[in-house]
Amino acid sequence: MPKAEIRVYPTERLGGRLGILLSGVALIIALVWIFRSILFVSQYSVQIAYAFIVFVFLTNIIHVKLNQGFFGFLGSLASKLGSFAIDISIAFFFAGFLGLEQLFTNYTLALSSQGSSCSSHRSYSGGSLSRRGR
């Protein structure tokens, strides 16, 4: 019975190390943003948030599987893009409580009723519908 062989390609090793490096840089950028007033970089808050987005994106994209055929590549790419969207929206949700600009908080998940697009349906008043003809 032949043994299953797992091959580790050099790009996967490089992608793993590079991914760790990029996620570390993203973490440092997030910490700089959190302590922006102490570090006197409050005026660069928007640029720091954009840099965080770029590094999280690169961290996710660097882990796309390239050696699993075309459909494996597409599935991996879709998975990593979805992971990026969820990561950023959760980060923006929690950063909204720490003073993230409105420019970014519009892109969070609809976890609260205030940010929901269905909030216009809440204006229904119970007594406005009545039976006519009585």
Image (cartoon, rainbow, N blue to C red):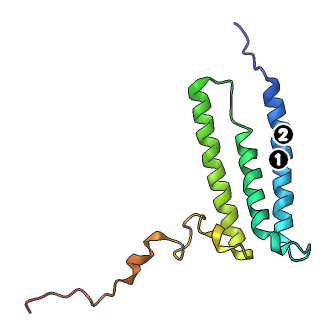
- Residue at image position (33%, 87%) is 125
Q: Is residue 22 left or right of residue 53?
A: right
Q: Which disc, if any, is residue 127?
A: none
Q: Secondary structure at mark 2?
A: helix
- Residue at image position (83%, 57%) is 27
Quarter assignment of residue 17: top right
Q: Is residue 30 left or right of residue 90?
A: right
Position of the C terminus by quadrant: bottom left
Q: Provide the residue designation for mark 2.
A: 18
User: Marks 2 and 1: in contact by CB < 8 Å?
Assistant: yes
Q: Provide the residue designation for mark 1.
A: 22
Tell me the CA gap for discs 1 and 2: 6 Å
Answer few, some or many: residues within 10 Å of disc 2's Cα (few below 14, many 20 plus, some between 14 and 19): some
Is 85 drawn above or below residue 69 in the view shown?
below
Q: Is residue 79 left or right of residue 126?
A: right
**In-front residue for pair 50/7:** 50
Is 22 drawn above or below residue 50 in the view shown?
above
The residue sitting at the left extreme is: 133
Q: Position of residue 126 (x, y in %)?
A: 31, 87
- Residue at image position (34%, 83%) is 124
Answer few, some or many: residues within 10 Å of disc 1's Cα (few below 14, many 20 plus, some between 14 and 19): many
Quarter assignment of residue 130: bottom left
